[in-house]
Amino acid sequence: MSPMNAHAQQAAGGPEVVVVGGGISGLAAAHRLVTAGARVTLLEGGDRLGGKLRAGEIAGAPVDLGAESLLARRPEAVALAERVGLAGRVQAPATITASVWSRGALVPMPKGHVMGVPADGNALAGLLSAAGVERIGRDAALPPTEIGEDVAIGAYVAERMGHEVVDRLVEPLLGGVYAGDAYRISMRAAVPALFAAARRHPTLHEAVRAVQRAGAATPSDAAGAGTGLAGGGLGGAAFAGIEGGVGTLPLAVADAVRAAGGTIRTGTPVTELRRTAGSASGAGDSGAGESGASTGRWQVVTPERTYTADAVVLATPAGPAAALLAAHAPAAAAELGAVEYASMALVTLAFRRADVQDGPALPGSGFLVPPVDGHTIKASTFSSRKWRWVDEAAPDLLVLRTSVGRHGEEEQVHREDADLVDVSLKDLAAATGLAARPVATTVTRWIGGLPQYPVGHLARVERIRAAVAGLPGLALAGAVYEGVGIPACVASAERAADEIIATSKTTDPGAGH
C-alpha cells in the first residue's frame, strides 16, 4: 500500500496501535501496520533505534557494530530493505570462503554439510582427525535413534557421528548464531529441516542428504563468520550485507514509518500495560476518554504519558515482555521469565594497510574458533575482505573484528576494553600471524543480547502464545519467538502485525460494508 493510501485509511480511522520496542522487530511491525492504514506509535525505552543492529565507524571507515549480514535465502529481511528504499544497496559478500581455526591452523571451511553435520565424513578430512572421520562413517551401521519431540543437536549428532564433528564444526557454527552450547541447543528450533528429516530417515547421513536435495536453507542468521548476532538471489549468495552497514536498515525503516504517518519516540520506556473499557476511536493520552465500548482497549503507561490504543505489539526481549504481561497473562510471563540470554562483545580493529602489506595473507572472509581449543575469541571477520563497501570507503585501512562471549561466559564480556583488544590481537596473531598494532579500536558489548534456544524452546513459545491468545489486540514479536536472525525477526514482526490487522477488520463495525 502506498503512503498516500495509508494516510487516507488513517484519516478514515484505522486502528490505533502502540508498538513497544524499537529494534528491527518493532520497527518492521510498525512499518507493516502503518502501511496497512493503522495509526501507529512506536515507543523505545533507549536513546537509539535498531536493537542489535547498529551502524558506526572506526578511523573514518563505516562499519557495523552489531549484526552485519542477512540470511539472503530467507526473503523477509531483503524484501523489507527493498520496501524502504535500500534495494540498490543490498550486496553479496566479496568472498564467501571462510576457515576454522582448529588445532593451531586455519583450515578451509568444509563444504557439503548442514550446520556442520556432513553428508560425507571424508569432506571433513582436513578438519577432523582420521579417527573423527572414521567415527562419522559409523552412523550408517547404527540403529535408528528415537528423538521424540525435540533433542539437543550436539547430543544427537555426537551419538550418531561422534563428539569430534560437534566440537570442531557444529559447535563453532551454532556458537556464531546463538552464542550458545550445541549440547543444549534445540535441534527442532535451530535446524528444523534437519530435525524433520532425522525423524523420517534411519541414519543422520540420509537425513542430511534429504535436506540437501530439498535445498532447505538453515533458518538461523549468523552475523558474518560466526560473530554471534543474530542474516536465492544476489548471485546465489547465502548471506547479504547492506552498503553502509546492516545497521542502516532500522534507520531506513524508521524513516519509512514516519513518512507513512507513524510516530516514533525514543527515551520512552513503557512501565505498565492496563486493560480498560474504552472509546472505539481517538487514541490519545489518558484524558482522551475511556468509556463507551465494551470491547476494551489498552493503556500503555510511560513515565510522561499514558497512551490508549486498540492494540499493542510487544517487541521487546523476554524479560521486559514478562514484566508487562505479569498482570494480564501470568503463565506467559512465567515462561518468558525463564528464557535465558547470552551476552557477547564485538572488538572492531582498524589497521593501516601499509603496516600489514608484508604480513600474512588473511584468507577469505574470516574464521570460526572451536571452544574446545580454549581460545578466548570465538570468531573473526575480515570486514575489509568480506564487504566491498568497507574496502571502498577506507582503501588505506584493513578492518577486522572479533567476537567474545558465549552463554555462561559473562566474565569474558565484562573484561576491560583494553583487555578484550589485547586478547583479540593475541588470538589473531596466533591464528594468522598478524603482528601489526591497530590505529583504532572499538569494543561494543551486547549484554543479554541473544536468547537461548534449549531443548523444548518451541514448546515454550507455543505455551506463551496460547497464554496470550485470550488477550484481544495484543501480539508478540522478536528474536525469542521464531529465530534470532534478522529475517526471522522480520517474519515474527509481520506475523504480529498481520494478527492485529486481521483482528481490527473482524471487530470493525463497518468492515465489509
Image (spheres, helix red, strand yellow):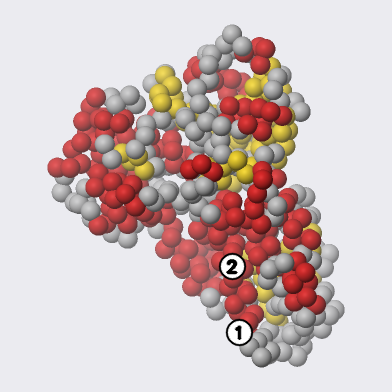
**Could you tell me if the residues under marks 1 and 2 are in contact, i.e. CB atoms within 8 Å?**
no
Rendered position, 425 above or below 263:
above
* Image location of residue 324, percent across then percent down: 64, 66
* Image location of residue 106, percent across then percent down: 43, 21
Which residue is label 1 attached to?
Answer: 506
Q: Evaluate whether residue 284 shows in this view.
A: yes
Task: Classify mark 1: residues with Cα within 10 Å, few (<14), some (14-19) or many (20+).
Answer: few
Quarter holding the C terminus is bottom right
Task: Name which residue type carries label 2.
Answer: Ala
- Secondary structure of the residue carrying tag 1 is helix
Quarter holding the N terminus is bottom right
Which of the 4 image quarters holds residue 161? top left
Q: Residue at x 69, y 28 (%)?
A: 392
Rendered position, 219 above or below 63:
below
Depth order, front residue of 199/114: 114
Q: Evaluate whether residue 49 shows in this view.
A: no
* Image location of residue 21, percent across then percent down: 68, 59
* First along the sequence among labels 1 and 2: 2
Rendered image: mark on residue 496? 2
* Image location of residue 421, percent across then percent down: 63, 24
Task: Name which residue type carries label 1.
Answer: Thr
